[in-house]
Structures are given as structure tokens and as C-alpha cells.
């Protein structure tokens, strides 16, 4: 477990201690929980990577029905949902 030093003004620290005590907790436990939630959120890179994998999976599924000799219909050619 790593230690993190955070600087806050005295009033903020005092209020945080009171609120933590009301919840039968400590300031450290509250900060630990908040950082845990923050770190668990999906990053922009992870969101885009997940989206890319979903698109590739859909394209792969569609490509199983596609061959070089098969002509696409006009609707298939202009299907925007396939790219999303």
C-alpha cells in the first residue's frame, strides 16, 4: 500500500474529520474510497479500445457473409450503423 500526502487548508481538514467521524470512518478511509472509485472509472483509452473491439467484432461477423464476388446492395453499401 502506498502513502499519499495531500495538502488542504485547516478548515477543509477539520470539516472532513467531522464528516468522517459522523460516518464512523477516518479521513484516510474516505480518501482511499474516493481514489478507488476514481481509479476504477474507465479511461478514455479503455473506452475507445472497447468500442474498437466491438466494431471489429461486428465487421468480422459481417465479413463472414461477404465474398469478393458478391455485390453489396445499395442499402448495405450505405449502412452507417456498421461503422459505429
Image (tube, rainbow, N blue to C red):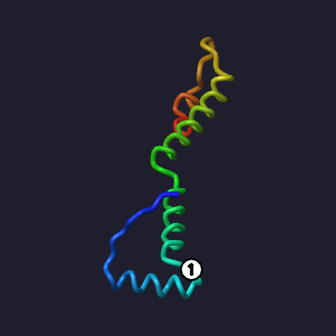
Give the image location of residue 19, x and y in percent: 49, 85
Q: Is residue 31 above or below residue 22?
A: above
- What residue is at 47 percent from the left and 50 percent from the top? 43
Label 1, secondary structure: give it. Answer: loop
Q: Which residue is mark 1?
A: 25
Is 18 in front, or is 76?
18
Identified at 64% across, 15% down, the residue is 67
Is 76 placed above or below 24 here? above
- Residue 26, given in percent of the width and then of the height, sits at 52, 78
**Image quadrant in which you'd find residue 69:** top right
In the rendered structure, the answer to whether residue 61 lies left or right of residue 43 reads: right
Q: Is residue 46 visible?
A: yes
Q: Quadrant of residue 40?
A: bottom right
Confirm whether residue 80 shows in the render: no
Q: Is residue 21 left or right of residue 8?
A: right
For disc 1, the neighbor class at 10 Å (few under 14, some 14 to 19, many from 20) is few
Residue 28 locus on image (x, y percent): 49, 72
Is 19 in front, or is 83? 19
Q: Exactly how many numbered labels are in the figure?
A: 1
Q: Closest to the observer: 26 or 53?
A: 26
Amino acid at each position: 500500500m502506498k502513502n499519499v500526502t495531500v495538502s488542504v487548508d485547516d478548515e477543509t481538514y477539520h470539516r472532513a474529520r467531522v464528516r468522517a467521524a459522523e460516518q464512523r470512518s477516518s479521513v484516510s478511509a474516505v480518501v482511499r474510497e474516493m481514489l478507488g472509485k476514481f481509479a476504477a472509472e474507465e479511461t478514455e483509452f479503455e473506452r475507445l479500445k472497447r468500442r474498437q473491439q466491438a466494431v471489429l467484432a461486428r465487421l468480422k461477423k459481417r465479413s463472414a457473409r461477404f465474398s469478393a464476388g458478391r455485390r453489396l446492395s445499395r442499402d448495405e453499401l450505405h449502412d452507417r450503423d456498421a461503422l459505429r
